[in-house]
């Protein structure tokens, strides 16, 4: 069975043999884009190469890129543990052409690698193309021999990629794998059969236009290629699994969590183990890249991720902090491909231990309050916003943690009520400020307090202002 480490190596090897420079993953905190919270695809480190602002000594590259999608345009946090295919942290394998080869070779490479090198049966694969991209449809017919009913034309923005409001853009073509009507891991109707029959594995972006002000699109003289394939989804296929969480790397983390808690990895707490495995990866990789838990911006995202996992650990009855105990398993699985994990092992362990130790005492009391309040709710009633706010303000429960806890009972939070409570607290804080009598000075202090004080919400605000890629 091909391990995830083998698959990554085979992918990079294939493109190296085909004239690509293998480039290291860039850090999760983008160096060249302050508007982007985390690196969320392979092309991020090449943005300026695609626009021509930056030159590199190669025109073809391949990477295994660390990605986090837990905020901004791509936020998969709420999917984790509930779909077979989403993580907050994942690896994106990609090949890139900077004005070198284009559509025909990109499709040839993808098809050859999938069906020859990895030996996937052609009849399990299908593709989408942008509805106006007849060229791509014709290439898929000719190169892959796909019949028309397995070349699906899509008219939505899903199949048209843009770097931003202006700049490079173009149609994309996505490759899907058919896991079949009876999905391994669970018969229809079982929790594993969650509608993920056709799974997107690889996105090929054909950057062929340059967009200026609305309505001014010109053809790029030297079009480019940007592709991204999810390693975990691909490993699932090659390892004969339907669910990414059943692949080698994630399974090892789930087993470590099961062992440390003494809870069945496949029992009723299956989702908790999955969430913990996923969140362990994103927390550790973020910490290794210098993102430490805090109350704003990126630091608040990592805190939210860690605390979510810690609630699951606590509710499984973990008697002491769980997350730091799982670090060795992660380093064993991924430390070779990502030596920064080994280098940062002590920092990851200490950071997780400190956060979990502190949060556990709050968790206990907060969960008690939550149970009390939900006990009062009738069928279908939502949790009041001021309760969610109290959990947030007094017990350090990020809103999404409360939502995640309630989800298991099929309940939701009154989010606008929560936001009102938050706004009211800010107003109260302002009113309580006696002030110096000098409006300009007061303003400075307020701004400062908002920045360093009760500003956990900045985490959300920063996300919505995030640039799109
Ligand atoms: P989906 O529609 O399944 O959410 P996507 O269209 O958002 O995927 P892309 O932005 O096209 O994904 O990213 C390229 C590839 O990266 C996808 O084809 C998939 O294999 C992988 N990928 C994307 N998001 C995730 C995730 N949250 N977890 C694991 N793999 C992912
Ligand atoms: Mg997505
Ligand atoms: Mg998609
Ligand atoms: Mg896609």
Image: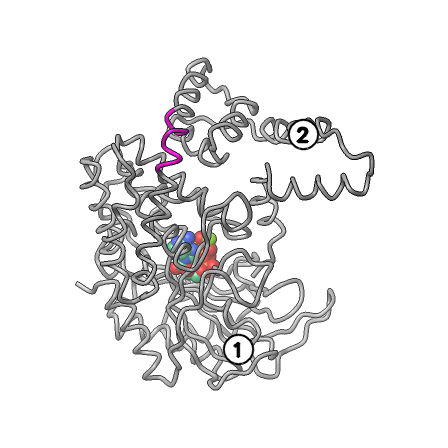
Residue at 49 percent of width and 60 percent of height: 29
Where does the image place residue 357, in percent across and percent down from the top left?
35, 37
User: Which residue is label 1 attached to?
Assistant: 224
Q: Does ligand 1 reach within 8 Å of label 1's beta carbon?
A: no
Mark 1 crowd level (few <14, some 14–19, many ≥20, 10 Å Cα): many
SS for dot 2: helix
Magenta span covers which residues?
Answer: 357-364
Q: Residue furthest front?
A: 436
Does residue 151 appear anywhere in the picture?
Answer: no
Circle 2 sits on which residue? 429
In-image side of 268 versus 207 (left or right):
left
Which residue occupies 39% across, 58% down?
Answer: 288
Q: Who comes first in sequence, dot 1 or dot 2? A: 1
Relative image position of residue 138 (x, y in whole percent): 46, 74
Q: Quadrant of the N terminus?
A: bottom left
Say whether residue 362 is magenta.
yes
**Residue 341 coordinates in the image, percent (x, y):** 32, 60
**Percent x, y of residue 376:** 45, 13
The residue at 32%/43% (across/down) is 276
Chief SS of the magenta region = helix
């Amino acid at each position: 069975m091909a391990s995830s480490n083998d698959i990554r190596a085979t992918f990079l090897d294939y493109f190296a043999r085909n004239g690509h420079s293998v480039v290291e993953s860039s850090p999760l905190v983008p160096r060249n884009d302050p508007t982007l919270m985390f690196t969320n695809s392979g092309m991020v480190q090449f943005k300026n190469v695609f626009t021509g602002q930056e030159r590199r000594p190669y025109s073809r590259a391949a990477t295994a890129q660390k990605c986090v999608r837990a905020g901004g345009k791509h936020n998969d946090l709420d999917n984790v543990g509930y779909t077979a295919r989403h993580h907050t942290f994942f690896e994106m394998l990609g090949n890139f052409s900077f004005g070198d080869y284009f559509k025909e070779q990109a499709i040839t490479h993808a098809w050859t690698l999938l069906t020859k090198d990895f030996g996937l049966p052609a009849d399990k694969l299908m593709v989408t193309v942008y509805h106006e991209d007849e060229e791509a449809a014709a290439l898929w017919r000719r190169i892959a021999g796909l019949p028309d009913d397995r070349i699906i034309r899509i008219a939505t923005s899903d199949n048209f990629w843009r770097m931003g409001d202006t700049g490079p853009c173009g149609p994309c073509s996505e490759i899907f794998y058919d896991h079949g009507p009876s999905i391994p891991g669970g018969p229809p109707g079982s929790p594993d059969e969650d509608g993920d029959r056709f799974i997107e594995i690889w996105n090929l972006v054909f950057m062929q236009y340059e967009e200026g002000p609305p309505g001014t699109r010109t053809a790029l003289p030297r079009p480019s290629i940007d592709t991204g394939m999810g390693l975990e989804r691909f490993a699932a296929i090659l390892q004969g699994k339907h669910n990414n969480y059943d692949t080698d790397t994630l399974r090892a983390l789930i087993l470590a969590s099961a062992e440390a808690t003494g809870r069945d990895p496949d029992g009723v707490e299956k989702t908790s183990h999955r969430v913990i495995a996923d969140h362990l990866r994103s927390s550790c990789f973020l910490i290794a890249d210098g993102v430490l838990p805090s109350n704003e911006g990126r630091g608040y995202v990592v805190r939210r991720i860690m605390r979510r996992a810690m609630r699951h650990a606590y509710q499984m009855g973990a008697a002491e902090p769980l997350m730091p105990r799982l670090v060795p398993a992660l380093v064993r699985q991924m430390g070779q491909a990502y030596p920064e994990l080994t280098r940062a092992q002590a920092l990851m362990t200490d950071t997780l231990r400190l956060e979990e130790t502190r949060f556990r005492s709050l968790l206990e009391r907060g969960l008690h309050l939550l149970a009390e309040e939900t006990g009062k709710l009738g069928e279908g009633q939502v949790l009041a916003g001021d309760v969610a706010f109290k959990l947030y303000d007094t017990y350090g429960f990020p809103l999404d943690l409360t939502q995640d806890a309630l989800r298991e009972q099929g309940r939701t939070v009154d989010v606008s009520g929560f936001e009102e409570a938050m706004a009211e607290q800010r107003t109260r804080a302002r009113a309580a400020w006696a002030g110096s009598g000098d409006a300009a000075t007061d303003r400075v202090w307020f701004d400062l307090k908002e920045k360093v004080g009760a500003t956990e919400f900045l985490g959300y605000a920063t996300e919505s202002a995030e640039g799109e890629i």
